[in-house]
Image (cartoon, coloured by chain):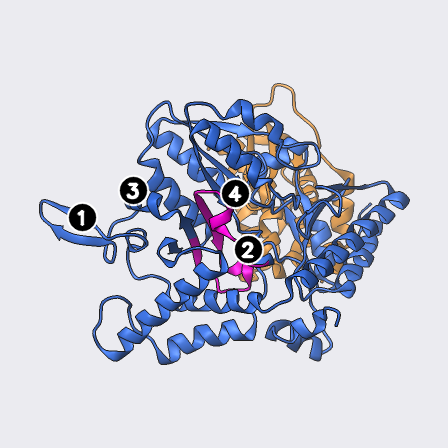
Chain colours: A blue, B orange
């Protein structure tokens, strides 16, 4: 049986209720935040309604059940990414996860050490390293992008030298949809004796991954982009590396013993989870991982590839008539993510998005927290559509038809 | 609702691009960024007897921002810094509290009243004022 996005939409109250009311929402901003299915909403609500207590402390039944639910969530999220539960650190979001890595791993670096970052990256995988550079006196090397908006991996070998301690890149671009050739990065890192951290925020929504096989050392992602709650993210690190690192933050929950003379640390992952963690959000994230896990990933991938191709084809047809569009990113069929960014020459992305918003088409316009990429590609900003399994041809066509009208009015 | 935002008056202001360009030997200049969208407005000012005698701008921004800069290039002529500040305050109050549209020399900014309902776009209109005030008063 073919994949049915309408059936998927029925799992999402916000989309389903709008459709029933005859006000279909063409939600194409999934790279920013995906919609959330009923099972996740219910999991979060149930945790607060029936199992509300702090974790890892109380001895009463509620506290023990809350702790069990939180640790079960860790197990389920670990299974989704092919990791051990003890390697899963819950954080507030993907940005927080990368910052935890920068703060903890950063303490092992010293002046003269170097970190490779990418022009392609989201600010969340740039600014923490810039802050670290200021604190520790390390240097940053920038991996450039190709004109089509992918990492120029041919340049990586020359950048990764004996002083390189870490290569921090995006597994998939939130702007161009380009996927990283992880094997090439890991090989370059191993030659240089460096570690690899990937921002996987745009990858994990598209199905389970296997971190044990990927070969990287740290991996960060967020919950809200993978149909989970806001306020939850994950830093994964190889067990032996996490065990070797000092904590990023201090407080309750991350200690072995606190004495006036000093403090010892809890083992990972607790060492990196100072304070009360996002319990209900972790439970919701596990529910989201399970929801994704039940999809037919091959069918979803084919569906999203078809929609991406339809969108890019449609944009090219408009461009043949108007000569005002520039689509950035690799062509369809090159393993690109279902994220399509384009420039309308002479019209600002916010004006395009505003006009499309009036037609219930939800897009993102601007620099997408990727200003170095915009500078590298010579763009002030782009309009971006990002697809999820609940999207269908109607969503893509609503965008294309609305875009033609917007161009007609603005240019 | 976008019909209101892109009504003729606003579009006309943007297309007229009053004041677009530079002032050679400007008395004051400043650039401000909107960190949310990356838009940037640079303003040059010339003064005579404490009042703005010329305003020029370079806008890398949306149509609303372009229209606002264009409107300001005309409206600010003859204003002193306090009047410029009052115009910005009146525009902000219109957006934030639903106060009446700016009056007097800044009455043209009443055209931006439809933006009130679009909170994410308020700063698009305010950015040229912010640049002019930064130029006039320093960072």
Q: On the image, numbered disc 2 is attached to which residue?
A: A204
Front-most of residues B115 and A273: A273
Label 3 sits on a secondary structure element that is: helix
Tell whether A397 sits left or right of A290.
Answer: right
- In reply to whether residue A225 is colored magenta, the answer given is yes
Q: On the image, numbered disc 4 is attached to which residue?
A: B85
Give the residue furthest to the left. A260
Q: What chain is tagged by disc 3?
A: A
Q: Earlier in the sequence, mark 1 or mark 2?
A: 2
- Give the label, 3 or 1, closer to the camera: 3
Asked whether disc 3 touches disc 2, contact meaning CB atoms under 8 Å apart, the reply is no
Front-most of residues A375 and A347: A375
Q: Are the numbered discs 4 and 2 placed on the same chain, yes or no? A: no
- In reply to whether residue A244 is colored magenta, the answer given is no
* Residue at (55, 60) in percent of width and height: A226
Dot 4 crowding, Cα within 10 Å, few <14, some 14–19, many 20+ = some
Q: On the image, numbered disc 3 is attached to which residue?
A: A244
Decide: is A141 above or below A345.
above
Residue span colored magenta: A207-234
* Residue at (33, 71) in percent of width and height: A68
Tell me where residue A51 sits by quadrant. bottom left
Label 4 sits on a secondary structure element that is: helix
Q: Which of marks 3 and 2 is nearer the N terminus?
A: 2
Q: How far apart are marks 3 and 1 (CA)?
A: 13 Å
């Amino acid at each position: 049986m073919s994949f049915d996005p309408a059936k998927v939409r029925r799992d999402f109250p916000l989309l389903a209720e709008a459709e029933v009311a005859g006000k279909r929402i063409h939600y194409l901003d999934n790279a920013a935040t995906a919609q959330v299915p009923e099972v996740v909403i219910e999991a979060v609500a149930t945790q607060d309604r029936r199992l509300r207590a702090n974790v890892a402390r109380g001895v009463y039944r509620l506290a023990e059940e809350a702790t069990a639910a939180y640790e079960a969530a860790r197990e389920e999220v670990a299974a989704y990414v092919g990791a051990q539960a003890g390697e899963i650190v819950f954080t507030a979001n993907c940005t927080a996860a990368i910052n935890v890595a920068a703060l903890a791993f950063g303490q092992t670096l010293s002046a003269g050490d170097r970190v490779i970052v990418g022009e392609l990256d989201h600010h969340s995988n740039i600014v923490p390293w810039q802050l670290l550079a200021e604190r520790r006196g390390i240097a940053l090397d920038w991996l450039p992008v190709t004109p089509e908006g992918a990492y120029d991996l041919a340049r990586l070998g020359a950048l990764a030298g004996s002083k390189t301690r870490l290569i921090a890149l995006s597994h998939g671009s939130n702007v161009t949809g380009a996927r990283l050739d992880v094997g090439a990065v890991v090989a370059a890192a191993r030659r240089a004796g460096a570690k690899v951290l990937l921002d996987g925020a745009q990858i994990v929504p598209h199905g389970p991954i296997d971190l044990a096989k990927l070969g990287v050392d740290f991996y960060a992602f967020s919950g809200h982009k993978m149909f989970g709650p806001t306020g939850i993210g994950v830093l994964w690190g190889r067990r032996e590396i996490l065990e070797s690192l000092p904590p990023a933050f201090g407080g309750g929950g991350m200690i072995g013993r606190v004495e006036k003379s000093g403090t010892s640390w809890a083992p990972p992952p607790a060492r990196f989870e100072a304070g009360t963690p996002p319990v209900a959000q972790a439970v919701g994230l596990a529910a989201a991982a399970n929801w994704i896990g039940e999809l037919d990933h091959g069918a979803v991938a084919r569906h999203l590839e078809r929609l991406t191709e339809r969108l890019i084809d449609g944009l090219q047809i408009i461009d043949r008539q108007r000569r005002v569009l520039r689509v950035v990113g690799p062509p369809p069929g090159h393993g690109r993510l279902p994220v399509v960014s384009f420039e309308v020459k002479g019209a600002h992305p916010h004006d395009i998005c505003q006009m499309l918003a009036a037609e219930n088409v939800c897009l993102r316009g601007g620099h997408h927290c990727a200003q170095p990429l915009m500078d590298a590609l010579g763009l002030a900003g782009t309009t971006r559509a990002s697809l999820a399994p609940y999207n269908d041809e109607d969503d893509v066509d609503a965008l294309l038809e609305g875009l033609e009208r917007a161009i007609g009015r603005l240019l | 609702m976008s019909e209101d935002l892109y009504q003729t008056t606003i579009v006309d202001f943007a297309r007229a691009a009053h004041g677009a360009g530079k002032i050679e030997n400007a008395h004051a200049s400043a650039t401000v960024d909107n960190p949310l969208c990356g838009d940037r407005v640079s303003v040059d000012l010339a003064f005579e007897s404490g009042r703005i005698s010329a305003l020029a701008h370079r806008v890398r921004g949306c149509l609303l921002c372009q229209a606002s800069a264009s409107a300001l290039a005309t409206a600010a002529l003859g204003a002193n810094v306090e009047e410029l500040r009052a115009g910005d305050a009146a525009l902000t109050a219109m957006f934030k509290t639903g106060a009446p549209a700016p009056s007097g020399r800044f009455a043209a900014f009443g055209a931006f009243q439809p933006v009130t309902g679009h909170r994410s776009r308020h700063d698009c209109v305010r950015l040229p004022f912010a640049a002019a005030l930064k130029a006039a008063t320093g960072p």
